[in-house]
Image (cartoon, helix red, strand yellow):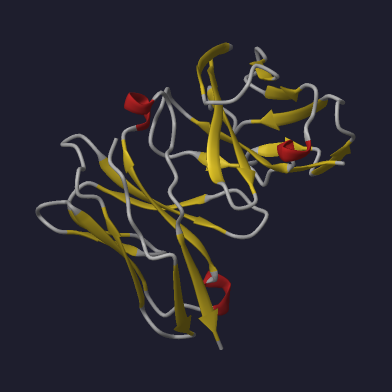
């Protein structure tokens, strides 16, 4: 199973772009990269998923280099409501017994 | 479209009692997953149900059990409660067997005193 490494915490200010990088050196050929967001006392919320290059949706962008050993979640112009824990997940749930394997996540704090 | 709903939102039990937590998946989703999130321990996989069958379970003792009903809703039972069972219990559902996009509910906060 691919292990992920993320910064434990990050600070930012409102209006800034935030980039959270996740390292996954032993990612497998079939693995997808998925990011979830979690607010206190709530379940995680799916943000974005990708396999290679760049994926963008209305919430975030995901950048994946050619070697796929890392990925970067980019949040444009963050607001106070983006304060949350962000998890990077690597794998294919069906190959992991249906499990999503969460690491420690990155606690993002957005200040006014 | 209604999301994943869990009940109750909060539950207080005494050590040794049994707790029952309920989950209703998104309409059309056949897979239901249970996770435990204890303070400082992160999200730990508990159980996966699909089409009424238990497909996988995490590294938890047998006193953690559950079932999935014909309407795909699910129940998690925790017997002989211990203080360390205090946690946020999260249910998620997905539309197909082990697909990528899981939708989580808001959880049940279980406190064992």
Q: Is residue B95 above or below residue B50?
A: below
Q: Position of residue A60 (x, y in %)?
A: 37, 64
Residue extending furthest toward the right: B14
The residue shown at (72%, 36%) is B85
Q: Quadrant of the N terminus of chain A?
A: top left
Q: Is residue A28 above or below residue B96?
A: below
In which image quadrant can residue A26 be found?
top left
Judge by depth and name the residue closer to the eye, A43 or B73: A43
The residue shown at (46%, 53%) is A104
Q: Is residue B72 above or below residue A65?
A: above
Judge by depth and name the residue closer to the eye, B36 or B34: B36
Q: Is residue B35 left or right of residue A99?
A: right
Judge by depth and name the residue closer to the eye, B17 or B5: B17
The residue shown at (43%, 37%) is A100
Q: Position of residue A81 (x, y in %)?
A: 57, 72
In which image quadrant can residue B71 be found?
top right
Q: Is residue B22 left or right of residue A88?
A: right
Q: Is residue B64 left or right of residue A30?
A: right
Residue extending furthest toward the left: A66
Q: Is residue A72 left or right of residue B42?
A: left
């Amino acid at each position: 199973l691919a292990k992920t490494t993320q910064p434990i915490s990050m600070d930012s200010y409102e209006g800034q772009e935030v980039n959270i990088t996740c390292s996954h050196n032993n990612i497998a050929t079939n693995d997808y990269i998925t990011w979830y967001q979690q607010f206190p006392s709530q379940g995680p919320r799916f943000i974005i998923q990708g396999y290679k290059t760049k994926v963008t949706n209305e919430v975030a962008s995901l950048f994946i280099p050619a070697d796929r050993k890392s990925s970067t979640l980019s949040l444009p112009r963050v607001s106070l409501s983006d304060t949350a824990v962000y998890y990077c997940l690597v794998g294919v749930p069906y190959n992991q017994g249906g499990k999503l394997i969460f690491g420690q996540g990155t606690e993002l704090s957005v200040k006014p | 479209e209604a999301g994943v709903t869990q009940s109750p939102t909060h539950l207080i039990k005494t050590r040794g009692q049994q707790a029952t937590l309920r989950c209703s998946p998104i309409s059309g989703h056949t897979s239901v997953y249970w996770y435990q999130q204890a303070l400082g321990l992160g999200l730990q996989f508990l159980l996966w149900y699909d089409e009424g069958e238990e497909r996988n379970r995490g590294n938890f003792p047998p006193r953690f059990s559950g079932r999935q009903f014909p309407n795909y809703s699910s129940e998690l039972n925790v017997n002989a409660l211990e203080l360390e069972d205090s946690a946020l219990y999260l249910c998620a559902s997905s539309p197909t067997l082990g697909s990528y996009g899981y939708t989580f509910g808001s959880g049940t906060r279980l406190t064992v005193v």
